[in-house]
Amino acid sequence: MLRPRISTNLAVSADGKITSVAGVASGWTSAMDHARLLELRESADAILVGRGTLEADRMTLTVPGRTRQPLRCIVSRGGELDLVHPIFSKDGGAIHLLVTDEPRGQIDPRVAVHRATLPEFLHTLAADEGVEHLHCEGGGQLIRELAVLDVIDEFHVTLAGHTVFGGQLARTATGIPAEYLPSALEFQISHFDARPELGECFVSYTRRR
């Protein structure tokens, strides 16, 4: 399958959660972790995020100081978007919306809509939009879908030992704990930066194929 190189980025609590049961927004990790998030965005031609994460974190998917902004790609089953969301008032790359089910609600005319599967959308980004590097910032369910397809090439994670979220239904890096992935995926550590003064450790993994 023709597709971009795909990287992902998440922060994970000491008990393996990316959020609380109530869905706490971003901002629970250090300022250094936020700076790393922006640094990881810089090399991407496009940023990918699930609608739930986009709205919970009020993300604009932009890179400060960069002249050519990455495409802003959103995955939503029904295509619903908050029309007063900050992404519509912040200058940035073109907004592409992947709708994987029957469209529901009003879709802003400033958005390029794709009715397709996730693999088809990845192909379109590479073939039609010239995207070589796609960077995904969650949520867990979307990263799980990418992992099932085995298209994740780099996995960046902040291990935040200072927080324990708890809760059986709190989301992990691959969604709500349920079935295991259909097969094991082997990664090797390519970067390891422990910051005990922050209670955090920044780790990067590369898919071993």
Image: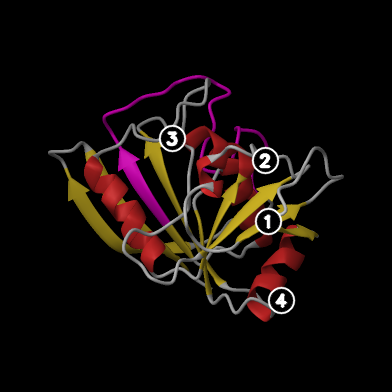
Is 160 within the magenta?
yes
**Residue indicated by mark 3:** 16
Query: Which one is earlier in the sequence, the residue at label 3 or at label 2?
Result: 3
Q: Where is residue 95 in the image (x, y as percent from the top left)?
A: 61, 58
Say which amino acid is labelled 3.
Gly
How far is disc 1 from disc 4 in space, using C-alphas?
26 Å
Is 68 within the magenta?
no
- On screen, residue 51 versus residue 56, left or right, reads right
User: What colouring style does the render use?
Assistant: secondary structure
**Position above or below: 205 against 141:** below
Q: Where is residue 48 in the image (x, y as percent from the top left)?
A: 56, 56
- On screen, residue 196 versus residue 190, left or right, reads left
How far is disc 2 from disc 1 in space, using C-alphas?
10 Å
Tag of residue 111: 1
Q: Which residue is drawn at 63% across and 52% down?
A: 74
Say which amino acid is labelled 4.
Met
SS label for mark 4? loop
